[in-house]
Amino acid sequence: MKKLMQWGAALALAVTCGAAQAGDAVAAYPQRPVRLIVPYGAGGAADVLARIMAEKLSAIWKQPVIVENKPGGVGTIGIMATVQAEPDGYTLVSVPVSDLAVNPHLYRKRPFDVRKDLAPVSQVGAVPNVLLVSNALEVGDVQALVARAAAKPGYLTYSSPGVGSQAHIAAEMFAMRAGLSLQHIPYNSVPAALTDVAGGQIDMMFAQLPAVLPFVKSGRVKVLAVAADARTPLLPDLPTLGEVGGPSIGDAISWSAVMAPAGTPLALREKIAAGIASAIQSPQVREKLAAQGLIGLGGTPQQLEQAWRQDYERYGAAVKAMHIQLLD
């Protein structure tokens, strides 16, 4: 019995010491450079957002936050590098909602399960999606667009940067909720899809606002509404779909988040999230984000988990309703 009591006391001491060491590690974090993986190439919205945030985080933490681009496989290579990393907070990944809530429902086989292999840290930024039409279509508002499409089922066309893209899903949800039949013309990129809307070859499109702004400012396309629950501060006079009586497709905002490998302690993720919030709330960072058409978010791991779960279920239902053939 005495030996058993001694063993129990030793075990309790070990557990206490382990917990104390873990707490010390969180308190001292970061003690070395942090790697922030972007699973896409340099220059895109995901990369720009990560670099703006990383610059400020480096100043806050007094440790370098190194952005590492790992493009390929529709985000697979960069996400896999994160999944395989140690869950110690020194390898993170900045990913768009498409990787977390859309692609899992589109691809037949992926070497990871985002719901099991990644742990939420914080939302970072968001990009509103807007509904735009070709000037050649000569419609002035959403109601006129719906009426034109209803009068000619299957005649109006919309473009997207590919099957299963958020733009594709938003347009199909718009059509289904309004009882319309639209013709989908997929492209290989957003610029190509937008260019043909501006040129009059395509009638309409849902697209992220930063990509659309140059076309709007030059008068080459007409923006009818923002596909979100609230107006965007980037175009405060632009109404939401709900405000103009359009079909409700939910909050089709494109957000990005920082994730960690599964097993990263919650206390550590909360500390990282606090640093991200401080960076995002900085006036300098907000100004830089706004210049790129981005909106800063921030938040806790718990808040990200809730948003992630909601969009995972919402986009899963949309993909199922659209009967999209799974991709390899």
Image (cartoon, rainbow, N blue to C red):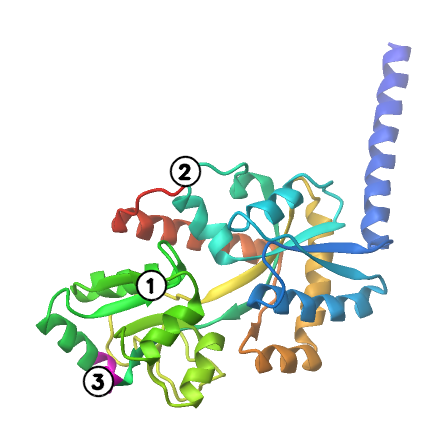
- Farthest residue, direction left: 151
Local SS, label 3 = loop
**What secondary structure is marked by label 1?**
helix
Q: Amino acid at mark 2?
A: Arg
When asked about the image quadrant of residue 278, the answer is bottom right
Q: Position of residue 194 (x, y in %)?
A: 38, 74
Nearer the observer, 202 or 307: 202
Q: Amino acid at mark 3?
A: Val
Q: Which residue is mark 3?
A: 139
- Which residue is identified by label 2? 108
Q: Is residue 60 left or right of residue 231?
A: right
Q: Quadrant of residue 11?
A: top right
**Residue at which label 1 appears:** 170
Q: Nearer the viewer, mark 2 or mark 1?
A: 2
Examine the rendered structure and indicate whether residue 144 appears above or below residue 83.
Answer: below
> Which quadrant does the C terminus fall into?
top left
